[in-house]
């Protein structure tokens, strides 16, 4: 499997109110129709509160 594109991930997180917990990010992406692979990858980021999209993208790129 290829790694999901961080730009696609941010499209699914559009409209998130930060700061935001990881579980809320995953829920938001799921509600907007993100596929299972992207949701799985997003679910692998550290379980913490994120202060903005750059922090999410940084962790998403590492996982």
Image: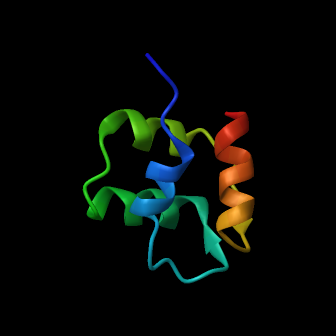
Residue 53 relative to residue 40: left or right: right
Q: Is residue 12 above or below residue 52?
A: above
Q: Residue 15: give x, y in percent of width and height.
A: 45, 79
Q: Residue furthest bottom?
A: 17
> Please, which colouring scheme is shown?
rainbow
Residue 10 relative to residue 49: left or right: left
Residue drawn at (52%, 60%), measured in percent from left and top?
23
Residue drawn at (68%, 39%), measured in percent from left and top?
61
Residue drawn at (28%, 63%), measured in percent from left and top?
32
- The N terminus - image quarter: top left
- The C terminus - image quarter: top right
Q: Residue 52: give x, y in percent of width and height.
A: 69, 72
Q: Residue 37: give x, y in percent of width and height.
A: 38, 33
Q: How many labels does the image show?
A: 0
Q: Say which quarter of the image contains residue 53.
A: bottom right
Q: Say which quarter of the image contains residue 36.
A: top left
Q: Which residue lies furthest to the front in this view?
A: 7
Q: Is residue 41 above or below residue 30?
A: above
Q: Residue 24: give x, y in percent of width and height.
A: 49, 67
Q: Which of 9 and 39 is in front in this view?
A: 9
Q: Residue furthest top?
A: 1
Q: In this view, does 44 lie above or below 1?
A: below
Residue drawn at (25%, 55%), measured in percent from left and top?
33
Residue 17 relative to residue 45: left or right: left
């Amino acid at each position: 499997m290829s790694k999901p594109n961080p730009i696609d991930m941010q499209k699914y997180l559009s409209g998130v109110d930060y700061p935001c917990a990881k579980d809320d990010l995953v829920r938001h992406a799921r509600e907007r129709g993100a596929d299972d692979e992207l949701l799985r990858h997003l679910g692998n980021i550290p379980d913490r509160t994120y202060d903005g999209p750059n922090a999410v993208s940084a962790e998403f790129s590492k996982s």
